[in-house]
C-alpha cells in the first residue's frame, strides 16, 4: 500500500494553494483531481489584496499574476440608468499593503500559476484520479483511489484535506452536514468582447428588470453577470441577445457586444459546514463554505483556508507542535467563513431581489443612500478593507497573544502590516522579508530618544534564538539610514508607525503572515515562555 503524509482531494485554487504551501514546507503529499484536464473557463475572476500578499510569498507570484491580469481601480453604480456614485481606489489610502487594488484574472490563469509553482518542487496534480471511499482510523486515513485505467489502488495517509467542492467526498465521509440552501434567483453570465464608454473598473446597474454587473478582464473581454431574464425558463440556454437586451434595459448609452468567449447559466448556494475538522479529515474552500459571488470572496477565502492549514499541518507532522494546533484551523477559519457568508448574503439579497416592493425601494433609495454612505473616506475604507480581506484577524485564537504591558493598536492574531524596508543588499518589504516556511521574529529599534542600537537588539534575543533557531528567523529593523550587513532600515520610521512601535519592540509573525505574539522589548522573556507552549 502506498503512503504519504497528506492527501489533497481537489486541485482547484484551494487545493493548489495547499499543495504549494506543503511543497514549500517540504511535507510529503499527493494531490488528485477527478477531471482529466483543467478547465479553460474563467470562472472566479478576482484576487483580492490579502490573497495577492499570500501568493507573493511564492517567488513574487502576485507580481507575475498582475502582468497577466487587469488591476481593477474603481467601481461605479447606476440605478434606473442614472449615475449614482463612483469610487476610485486611489482615493482610498492603504499604507500597509503593496497590493491595494483587486486583480481581475481568470481562475484558469490562477490555477496555471499554482501548477507551475508545484512543478518547481517536482510535484504535479494526479488526474484523472477519483477518491471513491475514505476510511478514518486512529493513526491515519485509508483512501480507495480510482485511476484513469479503471484500476483501484489504496493509499494510506496521515491526513486528508477535502478541497473538492460542494459535493465533497471528504465532507460526506466525515459525516458532516452542509447547512444552507440555494438562492431563489437564477443567473446567467457571459465573457464577451464589449465596446462601450466604461472600459475601466467594475460597473453595477440596477433597474426594475433586475441587476447587472460588468467586470473588465483583458483584451477587451468583459464578464457580465445578470439575473436570469424572466422570459427564460430553467432549460433555456442564454444567448448574446439576452445580454444585449439587458444593456438596453439597464445601462445608459450604447454598447456593442460581440465574439462571446463563454456564456453560461448557473444557480447559487449559500452553505457552511459546522466544523472544518473531524479527526484526520479537513475541509477547505467550497467543501467547507459556499458564498454568493458578492465581493468575490469565495475563491479568496478558500485559498486563505489553505494557507492557514498548511503551516499547521507541517508543524504537527514535523513534531514541532502537538495535535491541538490543528484544532485552531477550525477555530480561526470557521468564524471567517460564517462572517463572510453573513456579509455576502446581505449584499447579495439587496442587489438581486425580485420582490417588486424591494426593487422599488432599492432603485429609489440607492441614489440617495449610497453617496451618503460612501462619501466618508473612513467608512469607504472600512468597507473596502472587508472586501479586500485585509482586516481578517484571529484575536480570540488560543495560539496568539500579546505581552502583559502591550497597549498598541496591533494585537496577536492580526494580519501583519506590510511596509517598505531598505535592505543590506536590496530593498524589500516586511512581508517580503517574512516569506518561506518559518516563523519570523522582528526586532524594532524604536524611534527617537528611546531607540536602541543593533547590538542591544541582538543581545535581547540571543537566548531565545539559541532555543528556537530551527523554526524562527531573526530580523532587525532599525530607525536609521546607516547600512550594515545584518539589519534592515526604516529611515523615516514609517514601518515603526504601521506597527505602533515608538519604543524598542518585537513581533513574532507566523508563516501565514499573522501576528503570533507582540510586545515591548523589555518583555521578551514572555515571548520565550509563549514559544514553549
Image (tube, grey):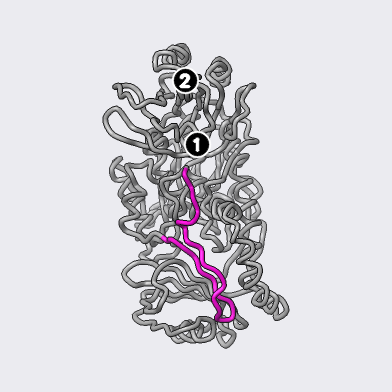
The disc at residue 201 is none
Q: Is residue 208 left or right of residue 69?
A: right
Q: Nearer the viewer, mark 1 or mark 2?
A: 2
Quick one: which residue is furthest to the right in this view? 357
Q: Residue at x 45, y 49 (%)?
A: 51
Q: Find residue 201 and report its image quarter.
A: bottom left
Magenta run includes residue 415:
no
Q: Earlier in the sequence, mark 1 or mark 2?
A: 2
Asked whether residue 352 appears in the rendered view, the answer is yes
Asked whether residue 25 appears in the rendered view, the answer is no
Instruction: Give the SS element for disc 2.
Output: loop
Which quarter shows the N terminus?
top left
Q: Find residue 477 and report its image quarter.
A: top left
Relative height, residue 356 to residue 184 (above, below): below
Q: Which residues are magenta?
A: 72-95
x, y percent for residue 255: 42, 83
How many residues crowd around disc 2 within 10 Å: few (fewer than 14), some, or many (20 or more)? some
Q: Nearer the viewer, residue 164 or 397?
A: 397
Q: Nearer the viewer, residue 66 or 114?
A: 66
x, y percent for residue 512: 47, 38
Q: Is residue 511 left or right of residue 524?
A: left
Relative height, residue 114 to residue 104 (above, below): above
Magenta run includes residue 79:
yes
Tell me how far mark 1 sits from mark 2, CA to CA. 16 Å
The residue beneath circle 2 is 451
Q: Residue at x 64, y 51 (%)?
A: 338
Which quarter shows the C terminus?
top right
The residue beneath circle 1 is 498
Instruction: Give the SS element for disc 1.
Output: helix
Amino acid at each position: 500500500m502506498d503512503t504519504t503524509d497528506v492527501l489533497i482531494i481537489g486541485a482547484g485554487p484551494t487545493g493548489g494553494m495547499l499543495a504549494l504551501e506543503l511543497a514549500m514546507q517540504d511535507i510529503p503529499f499527493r494531490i488528485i483531481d477527478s477531471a482529466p484536464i483543467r478547465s479553460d473557463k474563467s470562472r472566479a475572476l478576482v484576487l483580492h489584496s490579502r490573497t495577492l500578499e499570500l501568493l507573493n510569498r511564492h517567488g513574487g507570484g502576485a507580481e507575475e499574476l498582475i502582468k497577466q491580469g487587469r488591476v481593477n481601480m474603481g467601481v461605479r453604480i447606476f440605478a434606473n440608468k442614472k449615475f449614482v456614485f463612483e469610487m476610485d481606489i486611489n482615493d482610498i489610502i492603504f499604507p500597509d499593503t503593496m497590493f491595494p487594488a483587486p486583480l481581475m484574472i481568470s481562475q484558469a490563469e490562477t490555477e496555471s500559476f499554482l501548477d507551475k509553482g508545484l512543478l518547481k518542487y517536482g510535484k504535479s496534480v494526479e488526474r484523472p484520479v477519483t477518491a471513491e471511499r475514505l476510511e478514518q482510523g486512529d493513526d491515519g486515513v485509508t483512501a480507495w483511489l480510482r485511476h484513469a485505467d479503471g484500476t483501484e489502488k489504496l493509499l494510506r495517509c496521515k491526513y486528508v484535506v477535502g478541497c473538492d467542492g460542494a459535493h465533497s467526498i471528504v465532507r460526506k465521509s466525515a459525516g458532516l452536514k452542509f447547512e444552507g440552501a440555494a438562492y431563489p434567483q437564477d443567473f446567467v453570465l457571459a465573457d464577451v468582447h464589449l465596446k462601450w464608454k466604461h472600459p475601466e473598473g467594475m460597473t453595477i446597474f440596477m433597474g426594475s428588470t433586475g441587476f447587472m454587473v460588468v467586470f473588465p478582464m483583458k483584451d477587451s473581454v468583459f464578464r457580465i453577470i445578470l439575473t436570469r431574464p424572466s422570459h427564460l425558463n430553467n432549460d433555456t440556454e442564454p444567448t448574446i441577445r439576452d445580454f444585449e437586451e439587458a444593456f438596453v434595459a439597464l445601462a445608459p448609452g450604447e454598447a456593442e457586444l460581440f465574439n462571446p468567449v463563454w456564456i453560461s447559466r448557473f444557480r447559487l448556494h449559500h452553505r457552511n459546514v459546522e466544523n472544518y475538522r473531524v479527526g484526520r479529515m479537513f475541509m477547505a474552500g467550497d467543501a467547507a463554505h459556499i458564498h454568493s459571488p458578492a465581493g468575490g470572496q469565495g475563491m479568496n477565502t478558500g485559498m486563505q483556508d489553505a494557507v492557514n492549514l498548511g503551516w499547521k499541518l507541517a508543524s504537527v507532522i514535523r513534531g514541532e507542535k502537538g495535535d491541538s494546533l490543528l484544532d485552531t484551523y477550525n477555530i480561526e477559519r470557521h468564524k471567517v467563513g460564517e462572517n463572510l457568508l453573513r456579509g455576502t448574503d446581505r449584499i447579495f439579497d439587496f442587489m438581486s431581489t425580485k420582490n417588486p416592493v424591494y426593487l422599488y425601494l432599492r432603485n429609489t433609495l440607492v441614489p440617495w443612500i449610497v453617496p451618503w454612505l460612501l462619501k466618508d473616506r473612513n467608512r469607504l475604507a472600512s468597507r473596502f478593507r472587508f472586501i479586500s480581506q485585509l482586516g481578517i484577524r484571529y484575536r480570540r485564537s488560543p495560539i496568539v497573544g500579546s505581552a502583559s504591558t502591550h497597549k498598541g493598536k496591533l494585537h496577536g492574531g492580526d494580519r501583519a502590516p506590510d511596509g517598505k524596508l531598505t535592505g543590506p543588499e536590496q530593498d524589500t518589504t516586511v512581508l517580503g522579508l517574512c516569506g518561506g516556511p518559518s516563523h519570523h521574529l522582528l526586532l524594532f529599534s524604536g524611534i527617537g530618544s528611546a531607540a536602541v542600537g543593533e547590538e542591544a537588539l541582538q543581545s535581547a534575543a540571543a537566548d531565545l534564538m539559541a532555543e528556537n533557531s530551527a523554526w524562527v528567523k531573526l530580523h532587525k529593523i532599525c530607525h536609521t539610514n546607516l547600512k550594515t550587513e545584518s539589519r534592515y532600515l526604516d529611515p523615516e520610521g514609517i514601518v515603526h508607525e504601521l506597527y505602533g512601535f515608538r519604543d524598542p519592540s518585537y513581533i513574532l509573525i507566523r508563516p501565514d503572515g499573522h501576528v503570533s505574539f507582540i510586545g515591548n522589548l523589555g518583555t521578551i522573556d514572555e515571548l520565550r515562555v509563549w514559544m514553549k507552549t
